[in-house]
Image (cartoon, rainbow, N blue to C red):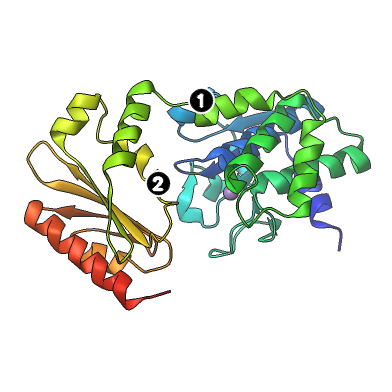
Amino acid sequence: MSSIMQQIYEAIQSYENIVILRHEKPDPDALGSQGGLAALIKHNEPAKHVVMQGEDEPGLSFLVSMSEETAALLEKSLYIICDTANRERIDGSGWDKAGQMAKIDHHPEVDVYGEPSWVDTKSSSTCEMMMSFALWLKEEKAWEIPAEAARLFYAGIIGDTGRFQHSNTTPKTLQMAAEALKYPIDPASLFAGFYSSEETLVRLKGKVLSDFELSANGVGVMYLTQSLLKEYNVTINGSSALMNVFADVEGIKAWVFFVENEDGSYRVRLRSKRIVINELAARHNGGGHPNASGAKAEDLAETKAIIEELNSLCQEQQT
Ligand SMILES: [Mn+2]
């Protein structure tokens, strides 16, 4: 059997119409793998009709924009799905009617789909896989790597490794990033796009860092009241960017933001390092992941109850 890269190459060769999709609420790895692969194919196979589909992500518009045109002739199209573990999360339509559907991803395989399916959970990011695919195409098929593809693959690697800080960073990750950097991609402008924020948000961040409370059990608490949000001119949605600003304080196990709604109730944003918090969230009209959940509190009394429950969870687990 030929290598997985050869199989994906052959799939690309077999179709004139290629639609590239990724998961909903895209992050830099999703957009980078989608946009970079599109740039790579367009550059080397200019006769092919390549379409990127999905909702645009306003905060990441400096990376790539989706195609204006829609896909034609679904049954004669190859769909390539990037960075998406399960079909439920695919952002875009028509893939269920595609002539062929391929998967390229690094998440644990919760939903087996795609022919061929290239899943490498040891890769930091789908973009790391894409960069190695690009190098293989260069070596084996004499393809060129356009700078735009290298820029987008680099962006995805940065995104999923947190600038090479997370434990998913391997020697291969750094090698692929180094290969991308051989092209004129201006990483400084990428960093500016990722990490610059509005002044109002930076000022509120200062307020949060000075005012959050940390209990002896390792529970961090911050209230964002209506008056505070108005004073700092930050919206409820905008304030979600502050979720992790004190997550690195020594001794913290879980943390919560109570964001006051206009009617005096609260949005509850919960995070934890290890303890499981989604059951607590479910008891307060919410839910989510074991370490990242959301809930609702009717009033101040319910926020106090949540703080107490979090403290007992953290006290139970003294690790
Ligand atoms: Mn990813």
Q: Is residue 56 left or right of residue 109?
A: left
Name the mark on residue 244. 2
Q: Quadrant of the image for the C terminus? A: bottom left
- Whether residue 86 is visible: yes
- Which residue does the image show at 46% across and 51% down from the upper left? 89
Considering the numbered disc 2 on the image, is that residue within a helix, a strand or a loop? loop
Residue 58 occupies quadrant:
top left
Q: Is mark 1 within 8 Å of ligand 1?
A: no
Could you classify mark 1 by the number of other residues whose Cα lies within 10 Å: few (under 14), some (14-19), or many (20 or more)? few
Residue 102, percent from left and from top: 66, 51
Q: Secondary structure at mark 1?
A: loop
Q: On the image, which quarter does residue 133 sit in?
A: top right
In depth, the one of 230 and 83 nearer the eye is: 230
Neighbourhood count class around disc 2 (C-alpha, 10 Å): few under 14, some 14–19, many 20 upward: few
292 lies above or below 68: below
Amino acid type, callout 1: Ser
CB within 8 Å, label 2 to label 1? no
Which residue type carries mark 2? Asn
**Residue at position x 36%, y 69% from top?**
276
- Which image quadrant is residue 33 in? top right
**Under 8 Å from ligand 1: the CB of mark 2?**
no
Mark 2 vs mark 1, CA separation in Å:
23 Å
For image coordinates 75% across by 40% down, the residue present is 177
Horizontal arrangement in the rendering, residue 7 relative to residue 201 (left or right): right
Q: Which mark is residue 289?
A: none
Q: Quadrant of the N terminus?
A: bottom right
Q: Position of residue 29 (x, y in %)?
A: 59, 42
Residue picked out by circle 1: 61
Residue 119 horizontal/vertical position (percent): 67, 59
